[in-house]
Amino acid sequence: MVKKIIPFFLLLAILLLPDQGLAQEISAPKYSNEFLNIGVGARALGMGGVQSAIVRDATAGFWNPAGLVGLPHRHNAVYMHSELFAGIIKNDYGAYATNLDSTSALSFSVIRVGVDDIADTRRLQNEYGAIQYDSIEFFSVADYAFLASYARKSNLIPGLTLGATAKIIYRNVGKFANAWGFGIDAGAQLRRGNWQFGLMAKDITTTFTAWRLNPDELESTYLQDQESFNANSIEVTLPRLILGVGRSFQFGNRFSGLVATDLEITTDGKRNTLLSTGIVSVDPKVGLELGYANTVFLRGGINNVQQIEDLDSKKSWKVQPNFGIGVASHGLQLDLALSKVSDNSQTSSVIVSLAYSFD
């Protein structure tokens, strides 16, 4: 059975890969709209972001919209907060999902990643050289994403669910610049007994984010080094594919286990990943969850496999570990996760999620 299912998902992945000639012609930058790749939900991040095949709650609108059909209750709401880089960056996420009927579901999600209270000291010194502290202004740099997702069971293949997410992106750099973008994600999940398979295609249409700079605030500064000033630009986000597989286990009446892995395939050129070429890069992830009586959960995951070069020019492979715990009772679930922002970072990110399910 497994041997028959895997080629099916591989074929879908190949069909969704972008035209590489077009990709090279566009010359899209790496890490475009990267705030959308931080991840959401303490359960997911405690497992290293491995979710494409196993997600079953409102966060599916982000990880794989096909998972919305598996909601255990009619309504599910999730809120997450985390702070990155010693609290400098605030990451907030909220989502609501509902079963429309026995075969379809709908969700709405909002993401905000931002840095607040940044001091603008350009006018600190007046024309006479005197310091004027009352001239200091403060602004925020924030990225927003608004997601609407829909999922439905397939009438052709038992256990197959399909989903899509439409996302609107708004990015703001105080009064200096802002941008609007639009993109579409699509996903599929297939469930066969204890086995679960997932395919997530992000930005399948290629996401274009149009930037508008404010000439009144930036032109005089920019022209000190350049001869011209372009107030408009377009940022391109190329598609990425995520192939996932998971298997659940039951130990007696109270203990359960879940093991899953994802292969994230980016199409914007060579990256520092375990497998990479000039066209695509592959980043593997592994996640584990152990449960007791569907009430207490322990989680762990490994992702972000990179080759790091030290000051002595010695290279070594490093991985990013992640850990998490969860408690669930009467539809209320509290999840905590500890995730390092990067392998060479000395600080870790604490993620807190609160979810509530009801009929």
Image (spheres, rainbow, N blue to C red):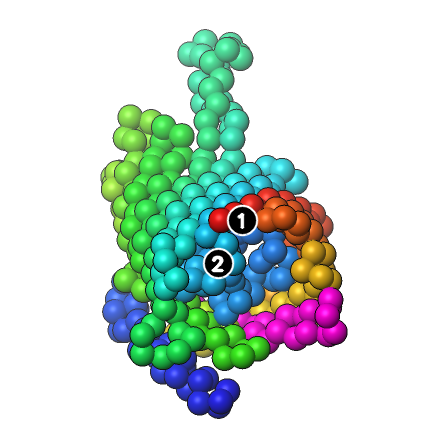
Residue sitting at x 58%, y 58% = 44
Residue 171 placement: quadrant: top left
Which span of residues is magenta-colored? Answer: 246-267
Residue 295 placement: quadrant: bottom right
Residue 201 picture location, percent across and down = 38, 67
Which residue is the site of mark 1? 357
Question: Going by the image, does 313 lie left or right of 235?
Answer: right
Front residue (pair 124, 2): 2
**Is residue 220 located in the magenta-colored stretch of the structure?**
no
Q: On screen, 177 above or below 196?
A: above
Q: Amino acid at mark 2?
A: Leu
Which residue is the site of mark 2? 71
**Is residue 266 located in the magenta-colored stretch of the structure?**
yes
Q: Earlier in the sequence, mark 2 or mark 1?
A: 2
Residue sitting at x 42%, y 51% = 98
Contact between marks 2 and 1 (CB within 8 A): the answer is: yes
Q: Residues within 10 Å of mark 1 (few under 14, many from 20)?
A: many
| Residue 243 seen in this snapshot | no
Mark 1 element type = strand
| Residue 95 seen in this snapshot | yes
Q: On screen, 93 above or below 150?
A: above
Q: How many marks?
A: 2
Front residue (pair 241, 157): 157
Question: Going by the image, does 79 lie left or right of 221?
Answer: right
Front residue (pair 166, 131): 166
Residue 290 picture location, percent across and down = 70, 65
Query: Where residue 155 is drawn, which disc sits there?
Result: none
Inter-mark Cα distance, 2 to 1: 9 Å
Mark 2 element type = loop
Magenta region's main secondary structure?
Answer: strand
Residue sitting at x 31%, y 74% = 155
Q: Amino acid at mark 1?
A: Ser
